[in-house]
Image (cartoon, helix red, strand yellow):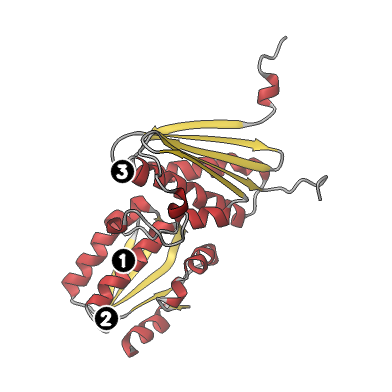
């Protein structure tokens, strides 16, 4: 699982890579939580550009981060969701909870404006 | 020369068993995908099949064995234009299948499970059967049509 972290204008950007299954999300969850803690960012953008595979464990990761970011009074957005993942996103109704934008810039704007 | 079990071999199959460790989730779905390649699936069909297998194996590991060591058995067969996958464990079983099938229901919210595993399986394969005996284990059987039978169309 490749992961790249960046702070852009006070928002934590996490670029995910590889396969988002139960095995991967166990460590990923702790890494993102730790980064939120260290950077003291309230906003979070998750980029799915490098994700080739995702199952319901990925949905759990998104909803879990949504809860922790919301609890700190922050906002969250997703971006770069490839067509392979679309069906899972649609089935889960995640679009109604977390905004999904085409690219990182739009996602950043969304989180900052909120 | 006599071919013992020749009729059985006309149906291609594969067995795989592995310990209930999370790193084996990717092994299971990649193995099924490689096996199903013989039917020349589209990328979308392959992704759906891999996702459904991943959900079933993850359930066996998290819910069946509750994180303890156990054995997960995977059986695959190609029948006509369809692939059939069976994922079996000797874990705790499912007490209430009706409840487990509810979208967003999870017995393990503390593990950040989304409760969408069974819903995803139901949507990504053509048929799904679940047999479970509390205290004995769970058997999930799924069937995905890759190449529709031209005769039945």
Q: Are marks 1 and 3 on the same chain?
A: no
Q: Position of residue A44 (x, y in %)?
A: 30, 76
Question: Where does label 1 land, which residue?
Answer: A64
**Cα–Cα gap, marks 2 and 3:** 33 Å
**Cα–Cα gap, marks 2 and 1:** 14 Å
Q: Which residue is rendered at x = 45% and y = 39% of the image?
A: B132
Q: Nearer the viewer, mark 1 or mark 3?
A: 3
In which chain is the residue bearing label 3?
B
Q: Which quadrant is home to the N terminus of chain A?
A: bottom left
Q: Which quadrant is home to the C terminus of chain A?
A: bottom left
Residue B43 sits in which quadrant?
A: bottom right
- The total of numbered circles placed on residues is 3
**Cα–Cα gap, marks 1 and 3:** 20 Å
Q: Which residue is rendered at x = 67% and y = 43% of the image?
A: B82
Q: Position of residue B91 (x, y in %)?
A: 36, 37
Question: Where does label 2 land, which residue?
Answer: A74
Q: Is residue B53 above or below residue A104?
A: above
- Could you tell me which secondary element the residue under label 1 belongs to? helix
In which chain is the residue bearing label 2?
A
Question: Where does label 3 land, which residue?
Answer: B66
Q: Quick check: can you spot residue A2? A: yes
Residue A47 sits in which quadrant?
A: bottom left
In which chain is the residue bearing label 1?
A
- Could you tell me which secondary element the residue under label 3 belongs to? loop
């Amino acid at each position: 699982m490749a992961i790249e972290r960046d702070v852009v204008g006070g928002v934590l950007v996490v670029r995910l890579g590889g396969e988002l299954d139960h095995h991967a999300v166990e460590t990923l969850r702790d890494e993102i939580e730790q980064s939120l803690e260290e950077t003291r960012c309230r906003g979070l953008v998750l980029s799915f550009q490098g994700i080739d595979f995702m199952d319901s464990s990925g949905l759990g990761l998104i909803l879990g981060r949504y809860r922790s970011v919301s609890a700190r009074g922050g906002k969250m957005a997703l971006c770069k969701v490839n067509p392979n993942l679309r069906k899972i996103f649609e089935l889960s109704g995640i679009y109604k909870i977390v905004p999904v934008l085409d690219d990182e810039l739009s996602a950043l704007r969304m989180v900052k404006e909120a | 020369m006599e071919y013992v079990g020749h009729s059985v071999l006309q149906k291609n199959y594969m067995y795989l068993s592995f310990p209930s460790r999370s790193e084996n989730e990717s092994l299971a779905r990649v193995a099924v995908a490689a096996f199903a390649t013989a039917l020349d699936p589209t990328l979308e069909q392959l992704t759906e099949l891999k996702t459904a297998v991943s959900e079933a194996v993850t359930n066996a590991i998290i819910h069946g064995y509750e994180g303890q060591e156990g054995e997960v058995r995977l059986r695959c067969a190609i029948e006509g234009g369809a692939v059939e996958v069976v994922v079996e464990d000797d874990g705790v079983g499912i007490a209430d299948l009706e409840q487990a099938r509810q979208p967003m229901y999870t017995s393990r919210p503390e593990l950040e499970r989304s409760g969408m595993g069974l819903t995803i399986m139901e949507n990504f394969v053509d048929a799904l059967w679940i047999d479970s005996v509390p205290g004995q284990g769970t058997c999930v059987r799924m069937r995905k049509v890759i190449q529709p039978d031209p005769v039945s169309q």
